[in-house]
Image (tube, rainbow, N blue to C red):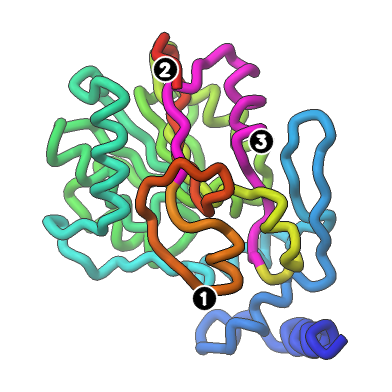
């Protein structure tokens, strides 16, 4: 009860406070988190995709991702990459022939680290999409990113589309999947890394996440069947949800555990089975 009452108070503060002030000043995370106030998680019986029953407005989401919701660092040098980015690059190199990839689009790019590394190693033409004004400024200054966009470019296709820890945060998941499918070349690959949502996760309140969509292997299976794409690989990373939630254990090492907190997958035309 105490938790719900406090969230109600945070929501009132958020409602009354001028949004320009929320954007320009540093406010406690709980106040901005209140855009998820009183939301519950529901699941589609057909595709297995879960979402909040009440999604925050696009205006409030934009505010979130331009303030405390943008956790991407834009201060690293182009020759210094995170362990996650290096691991993702090795994963792509292992599962697909990157020498045949000519163009990539990174959706929800943040600082576009993976695109930068693909540019350095394989001279791939890079396009980055992000909603954060801070990220866009950084990406436009970075000479390893060829094109920077706020929305999907029209009538252009890519050999690989990257979605790293972003699909659970978009305002309209089905619409974004449609746009990604339309933007993939006929031999293109769709790389996804995302929180791996299972039954352990649903013990959390929707307002604690703060996610909008809740993705797992069942959802990926559904996406792959829409366009008859193969799942080239599907792998798990990190600790179990119960250890992450109750013990605070954090790592992104490969595992064989289906209740790990992260999954990584590639969809494409390959005949390789996972």
- Specify the label residue 68 is tagged with: 1
- Can you say which quadrant of the picture contains the N terminus? bottom right
Q: Which residue is mark 3?
A: 175
Classify residue 109 as left or right of residue 63.
left
Q: Residue at x 23, y 25 (%)?
A: 98
Q: Can I make out residue 155 in this image?
A: no
Q: Residue at x 19, y 46 (%)?
A: 144
Where is 222 relative to 56, above or below?
above
Mark toward the start of the polypeptide (1 vs 3): 1
Q: Which residue is mark 2?
A: 185
Q: Can I make out residue 212 in this image?
A: yes
Crowd around label 1: few <14 · some 14–19 · many ≥20 (10 Å): some
Residue toward you, 159 or 264: 264
* Residue placed furthest toward the right: 1
Where is 100 relative to 260, above or below?
above
Label 1 vs label 3: CA separation?
25 Å
For the record, the magenta segment spans: 209-236
Task: Answer with the quarter of the image where residue 136 lies.
Answer: bottom left
Q: Residue at x 68, y 35 (%)?
A: 174
Label 1 vs label 2: CA separation?
35 Å
């Amino acid at each position: 009860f105490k938790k719900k009452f406090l969230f109600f108070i945070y929501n009132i503060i958020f409602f009354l406070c001028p949004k320009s002030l929320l954007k320009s000043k540093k406010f406690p995370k709980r106040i901005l988190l209140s855009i998820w106030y009183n939301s519950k998680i529901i699941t589609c019986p057909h595709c297995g995709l879960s979402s909040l029953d009440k999604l925050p407005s696009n205006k409030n989401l934009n505010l979130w991702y331009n303030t405390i919701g943008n956790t991407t660092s834009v201060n690293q040098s182009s020759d210094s990459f995170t362990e996650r980015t290096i691991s993702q690059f090795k994963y792509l190199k292992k599962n697909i022939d990157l020498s045949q990839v000519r163009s990539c689009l990174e959706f929800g790019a943040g600082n576009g680290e993976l695109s930068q590394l693909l540019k350095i190693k394989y001279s791939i033409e890079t396009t980055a999409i992000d909603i954060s004004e801070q990220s866009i400024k950084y990406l436009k200054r970075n000479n390893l990113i060829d094109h920077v966009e706020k929305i999907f470019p029209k009538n252009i296709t890519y050999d690989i589309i990257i979605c790293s820890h972003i699909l659970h945060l978009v305002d309209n998941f089905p619409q974004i999947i449609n746009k990604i499918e339309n933007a993939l070349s006929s031999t293109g690959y769709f790389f996804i890394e995302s929180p791996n949502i299972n039954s352990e996760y649903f013990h959390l309140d929707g307002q604690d996440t703060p996610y909008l969509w809740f993705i797992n292997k069942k959802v990926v299976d559904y996406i792959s069947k829409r366009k008859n794409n193969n799942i080239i690989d599907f792998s798990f990373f990190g600790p179990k949800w119960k250890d992450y939630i109750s013990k605070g254990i954090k790592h992104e090492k490969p595992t064989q555990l289906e209740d790990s907190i992260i999954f990584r997958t590639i969809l494409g035309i390959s005949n390789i089975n996972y």
